[in-house]
């Protein structure tokens, strides 16, 4: 790769997130900026970093670290509880140290990928890799959907500990990558998912160390949520890592900021006028530009040209495209999607003709025929017009997306969607109880769910049901109705998830908890980013009872399917699931899959364990149960629960 010019601008997507496709946020920004003649280069450290993790040399380094650390602990007469926690993880990880290159090969091979046993072995291999990392980087844990501490939420103390100990698995990788950027003038990092928090802050610090004058900016839905919900002190501390935060959508922000930076040393008042830009002003003050919502008619086609689309963990190319933003319903009690809580994220659409032209051009330019329409939701009128446009244009593509259950989707219209290439749809079904659906303000009932789901299924489109139990006020019987509806409609439900209610900041319930029978809402002391709301039901409020019984029912339903977590085949709205549906048909997940033989353990040196790993694990479990029972309880005066990184270590020290 050529050395970039001095002062160039970059947008980076940090780990950990879905590695099976390129996420759409940064290509969307690059497309828009490119149309205005503003150059930015994209770097997907999520996927490039995964290749680094999967390299044989990386694993060899980890194997040596595990062996050395075990030997060191074995020399002790006695282990502290904290060392015991690390010890059993090291002991379990050692036999898993092997070359995982074969997993990568299977997941990228168009034949082997569809061999279910081989696929599952490769999937298990990647999960094993994360288990090895959990030992090497103890007390941190990683997966494509998670990067966290054993127990404490990310606060600044924990982040500083992570940075100071160079605990990032990518420490060396980042240095190599950043060295290739020359002398950048601007680096923007996309903090979309909570699972990207530690790597994003780690990168910010490293970038500032390597390029002290480079302008560093954060953007994306997760940092927007953090700024929206955190207190002023925490927000101010973010500016020890970055020069600016982009709130909401980034198109106008970057279109105005980058030319100013390119021109050199912009005046503070000009920066302060940039839409959606938050910066530190004089003293303690924060300066925020005017809030602006992006008009989607001005959107440009996402530009994926900087990314090597064959690096992703899939045997085919699939591109994400966001034809709409926001939700036209936007009143479900539990929901706070993306920027919705700002009140400025109205439902908007890219004109149909433009969306069809974009899909066509992306197919031609990037050789992808599969698309995920990545959005909160598409309105029925839009989805149908888009389908007609795709057919009229003669586009041969397959796609999946999220839709709302709506009476507008007649059998004939569902067949139109199928002809346009729609092969998988995810519905927010939420509940099978009509009373709970009303309580949620979902605007649908179980009869409509049955009818519309049938129309899609019978048109040949795979249907995924997203449901959850324990909405505040839901009884055990009503939770059972949700599971009963999934069971009753099973022949036409091609995938499902029955999750647990989560209280999301910004949702109607979190704003008016008393209306839903919630007694108190609180955070843990360490949750300075205010991402994880906890709650207790009030005296008169009920929540789902008979949990054991419900668990059994979920298990019984699940046994009829092949279900999995993100991003694997069997999870909802993922690349691998769409590929399997295209290959194996609508019901490919509606039956159990064969279990592969357990993976052969790597040739670990047969180290003798001086301490019993099982005993160590048991002591950890006993401690954690007691600790969490206390650490998650709010203080008597209605304050936060004590759990934090510092509190955890204090509790350990008192053991
Ligand atoms: C489609 C979608 C999915 C899809 C695809 C996700 C994927 N990995 O590709 C599916 C269904 C698979 C999914 C899964 C999950 N999702 Co989701 N998803 C969305 C959704 C509805 C739309 C995303 C989208 O396409 N937006 C359109 C693009 C163009 O916008 P964007 O990415 O926000 O980028 C814009 C701005 O943020 C900004 N920007 C972005 N980066 C930067 C950088 C800089 C420097 C600047 C200035 C600006 C900027 O400019 C961009 C253009 O305007 C959003 C909700 C929403 N409305 O954002 C949730 C959302 C992104 N998901 C979320 C979550 C939590 C998840 C899950 C973790 C859920 C779970 N419990 O498992 C999983 C994780 C999957 C994974 N590991 O990757 C959260 C993320 C925040 C958080 N709290 O973590 C969101 C915001 C929803 C929410 N609850 O608020 N998701
Ligand atoms: S749950 Fe779905 S339909 Fe309801 S407000 Fe959220 S995005 Fe809209």
Image (cartoon, grey):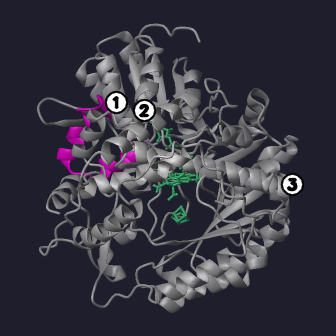
Residue 119 is inside the magenta segment: no
Residue identified by numbered label 3 = 419
Q: Residue at x 78, y 31 (%)?
A: 367
Under tag 2, what secondary structure?
Answer: strand
Return the disc, 1 or 2, that comes first in the chain's sequence: 2
Under tag 3, what secondary structure?
Answer: helix
Of badges 1 and 2, the one in the foreground is 1
Residue 287 seen from this side: yes
Residue identified by numbered label 2 = 189
Q: Residue at x 30, y 25 (%)?
A: 271
Percent of width and height locating residue 11 = 48, 27
In the rendered view of the protein, which quadrant contains the N terminus? top right
Q: Residues within 10 Å of mark 2 (few under 14, many from 20)?
A: many
Return the disc, 1 or 3, that comes first in the chain's sequence: 1
Return the disc, 2 or 3, that comes first in the chain's sequence: 2
Q: Nearer the viewer, residue 627 or 333?
A: 627
Contact, CB < 8 Å: mark 1 with mark 3? Answer: no
Contact, CB < 8 Å: mark 1 with mark 2? Answer: yes
Q: Residue at x 39, y 20 (%)?
A: 186
Contact, CB < 8 Å: mark 2 with mark 3? Answer: no
Residue 228 is inside the magenta segment: yes
Percent of width and height locating residue 298 = 57, 34
**Ligand 1 is within 8 Å of the C-beta of the residue at disc 2:** yes
Q: Residue at x 29, y 28 (%)?
A: 243
Q: Is residue 256 above or below residue 251?
A: above
Residue identified by numbered label 1 = 204
Looking at the rendering, the stretch of residues picked out in magenta corresponds to 221-248
Under tag 1, what secondary structure?
Answer: helix
């Amino acid at each position: 790769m050529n050395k970039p010019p001095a002062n160039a601008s970059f947008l980076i997507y940090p780990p950990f997130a879905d590695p099976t496709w390129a996420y759409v946020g940064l290509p969307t920004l690059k497309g828009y900026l490119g149309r205005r003649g503003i150059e930015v280069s994209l770097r997907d450290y999520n996927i490039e970093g995964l290749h680094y993790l999967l390299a044989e040399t990386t694993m060899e380094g980890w194997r040596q670290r595990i062996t050395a650390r075990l030997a060191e602990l074995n020399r002790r007469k006695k282990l502290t509880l904290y060392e015991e926690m690390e010890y059993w993880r090291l002991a379990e990880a050692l036999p898993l140290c092997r070359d995982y290159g074969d997993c990568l090969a299977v997941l990228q091979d168009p034949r082997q990928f569809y061999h279910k046993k081989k696929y599952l072995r490769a999937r298990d291999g990647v999960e094993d890799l994360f288990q090895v990392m959990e030992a090497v980087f103890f007390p941190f844990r990683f997966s494509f959907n998670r990067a966290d501490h054993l127990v404490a939420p990310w606060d600044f103390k924990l982040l500083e500990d992570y940075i100071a100990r160079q605990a990032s698995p990518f420490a060396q990788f980042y240095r190599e990558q950043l060295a290739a950027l020359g002398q950048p003038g601007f680096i923007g990092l996309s903090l979309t998912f909570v699972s990207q928090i530690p790597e994003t802050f780690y990168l910010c610090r490293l970038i500032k160390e390597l390029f002290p004058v480079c302008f560093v900016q954060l953007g994306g839905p997760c940092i927007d949520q953090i700024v929206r919900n955190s207190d002023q002190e925490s927000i101010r501390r973010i500016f020890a890592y970055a020069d600016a935060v982009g709130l909401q959508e980034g198109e106008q922000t970057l279109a105005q900021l980058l030319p100013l930076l390119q021109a050199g040393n912009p005046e503070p008042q000009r920066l302060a006028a940039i839409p959606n830009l938050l910066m530190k002003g004089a003293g303690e003050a924060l300066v925020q530009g005017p809030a602006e919502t992006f008009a989607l008619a001005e959107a440009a086609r996402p530009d994926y040209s900087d990314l090597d689309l064959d690096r992703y963990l899939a045997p085919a190319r699939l591109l994400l495209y966001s034809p709409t933003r926001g939700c036209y319903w936007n009143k479900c009690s539990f929901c706070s999607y993306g920027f919705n809580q700002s009140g400025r994220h109205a439902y908007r659409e890219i004109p149909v003709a433009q969306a069809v032209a974009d899909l066509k051009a992306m197919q031609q330019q990037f050789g992808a025929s599969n698309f995920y329409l990545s959005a909160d939701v598409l309105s029925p009128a839009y989805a149908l017009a888009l389908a007609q446009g795709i057919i009229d244009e003669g586009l041969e593509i397959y796609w999946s997306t999220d839709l709302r259950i709506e009476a507008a989707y007649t059998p004939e219209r569902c067949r139109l969607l199928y002809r346009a290439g729609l092969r998988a749809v995810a519905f927010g079904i939420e509940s099978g109880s009509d009373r709970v659906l009303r309580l949620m303000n979902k605007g649908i009932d179980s009869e409509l769910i049955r009818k519309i789901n049938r129309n899609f299924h019978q048109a040949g489109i795979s249907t995924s049901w997203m449901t959850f139990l324990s909405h505040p006020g839901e009884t055990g019987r009503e939770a059972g109705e949700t599971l009963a509806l999934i069971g009753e409609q099973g022949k036409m439900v091609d995938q499902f998830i029955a999750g647990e209610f989560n209280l999301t900041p910004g949702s109607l319930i979190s704003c008016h908890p008393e209306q839903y029978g919630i007694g108190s809402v609180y955070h843990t002391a360490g949750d300075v980013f205010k991402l994880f709301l906890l709650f207790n039901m009030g005296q008169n409020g009920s929540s789902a009872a008979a949990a054991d019984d419900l668990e059994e029912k979920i298990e019984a339903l699940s046994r009829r399917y092949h279900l999995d977590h993100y991003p694997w085949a069997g999870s909802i709205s993922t690349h691998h699931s769409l590929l399997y549906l295209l290959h194996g048909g609508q019901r490919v997940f509606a039956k159990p899959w064969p279990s592969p033989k357990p993976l052969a353990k790597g040739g670990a040196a047969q180290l003798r364990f001086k301490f019993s790993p099982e005993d160590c694990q048991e002591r950890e479990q006993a401690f954690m149960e007691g600790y969490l029972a206390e650490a998650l309880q709010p203080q008597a005066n209605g304050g936060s629960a004590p759990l934090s990184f510092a509190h955890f270590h204090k509790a350990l020290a008192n053991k």
